Amino acid sequence: MLRSMELGGIGPAMRLGPVEFAERLNLVTGDNGLGKTFLLDIGWWALTGTWVAREPWPRNETTREEPPYISSTVAGKTTDAPVHSAYDFDARKWSYPAGRPPMPGLVLYFRGDGCFSLWDPAQHYWTKSAADERVDDAFHFTLDSVWDGIMGVGGQRICRGLIEDWVTWQQTGGLEFQRFQKVLAKLSPSPKELLTSGTPLAALALDATDRRQHPTLQFGHGTVPAVLASAGMKRILSLAYLVVWAWQGHELASAARKQDPEQRMVILFDEPETHLHPQWQRRILPALFAALAELRNDLRAQILVATHSPLILASVESLFDAEKDRLFHLEICSDEPPTNEMEEFLFEEPRVEMREVPFAKEGDASAWLSSDVFGLTQARSLEAERAITAAQQFQLGSADGNPEGLRTRGQIDDELKKVLAAEDPFWPRWVILP
């Protein structure tokens, strides 16, 4: 599991961290472009020694004398150990410590674009016989290969994909299908809308050139081929399938090595709200914890989530434990004085910092929107916020500074009628107060 991380010379900040992560749930929030996804990419590198995409490029301010670095602490089975990586300007790549680093457990990365990566210690870890030998790779899925499968470098088939595996599991009715059904049920949008497997479509029934049988979802109004489901449902189907497939492969590989399956798993989850209806957004993280328990009831999972959704944060209010979980916020900070010469050189530019935010129950999603995490003045449209601000200034007797067209009571009243609902809670204050 990932204990801590500190970055220098890469990403949106010259220095970031050190950041101490919690053992169970870590929520990362912040505006676009401040490095939420970048942080998950770096977390993947720290845990696995591989990259999911292009390696990060050093910032222009870096030098050979002080090269960019990624310093982290990874928790192994019995001990925590530092993992320090530095950028080699000659090789133009990142170094990774030699030998066998602490093994973090399974590492799954659900990316915001629908792609997926898996690092399995039973298949990708360094061997005991040769400390310097390692498999410098992981399983990487594109959006399409999640459904159609992936091939290995030597032409061997690593994964048959969701379409074929789902049908095969269903027809054999074995443990994998039982797990898949249970995980699907946990991840369903509501108890009244359970995602349930229907009868597979016969070969060529969906596509005259596709000889595969296709899985279906059973609804009250009939069956729907899984490949024709909505974007939100397809993302959940992919999530459920890949969790089960990853664990099945880990159990098989562990058995072949004559070792016990892992009890630990790290999940990096980028924007879990993508494509999901609000009803689903407020269930997805609690449902994911419940789904993982279907794999192994003593599984210890650490989840790092990057999110823009107030409903995601509202959804964890009942399960958030300050001893096991943390909330972080990435933000631009330019008003603090520099602490060294390098920071003084960069002080003219805004700096990004990552700070832990005390988790406080806001009660509903709109309150989260106006909290420090999301920073909206009001959970309304820009036009409504502008009109209410003008109304408040008018009531304070300082309407001269209002925008043109919002300086008289009549102008403000007309604008409020356009932008506010009849039952908006601001109306009593506007109507009653002078």
Image (spheres, grey):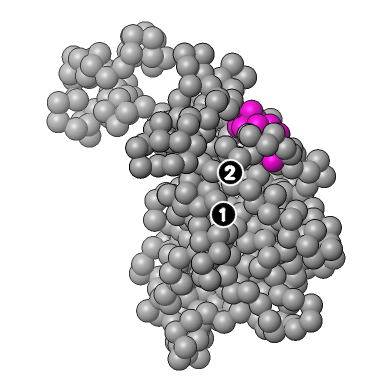
Q: Which mark is residue 159?
A: 1
Q: Identify the image quadrant of the C terminus.
A: top left
Picture coordinates of residue 133 (x, y %)?
68, 81
The three-letter amino acid code for the residue at tag 2 is Asp
Task: Classify 113 as above or below 368.
Answer: below
Q: Which mark is residue 345?
A: none
Residue at x 52%, y 79% (from the top left corner):
94
Secondary structure at numbered mark 1: strand
Q: Identify the image quadrant of the N terminus.
A: bottom right
Task: Classify 278 as above or below 93.
Answer: above
Picture coordinates of residue 287 (x, y %)?
64, 33
Residue at x 72%, y 63% (from the top left corner):
122
Please identify the dominant SS of the magenta region.
helix
Q: Is residue 379 left or right of residue 189?
A: left
Q: Is residue 263 left or right of residue 27?
A: right
Q: Is residue 199 left or right of residue 299?
A: left
Q: Nearer the viewer, residue 369 or 195?
A: 195
Picture coordinates of residue 159 (x, y %)?
56, 54
| Quarter where residue 197 is shown | top right
Residue at x 59%, y 16% (from the top left corner):
192
Secondary structure at numbered mark 2: helix
Residue at x 63%, y 61% (from the top left corner):
119
Q: Nearer the viewer, residue 314 or 290?
A: 290
Q: Are marks 1 and 2 in contact (CB under 8 Å)?
A: yes
Circle nearer the N terminus (1, 2): 1
Mark 2 highlights which residue?
165
The three-letter amino acid code for the residue at tag 1 is Cys
The magenta stretch spans which residues?
176-188
Does the segment drawn in magenta span residue 181?
A: yes
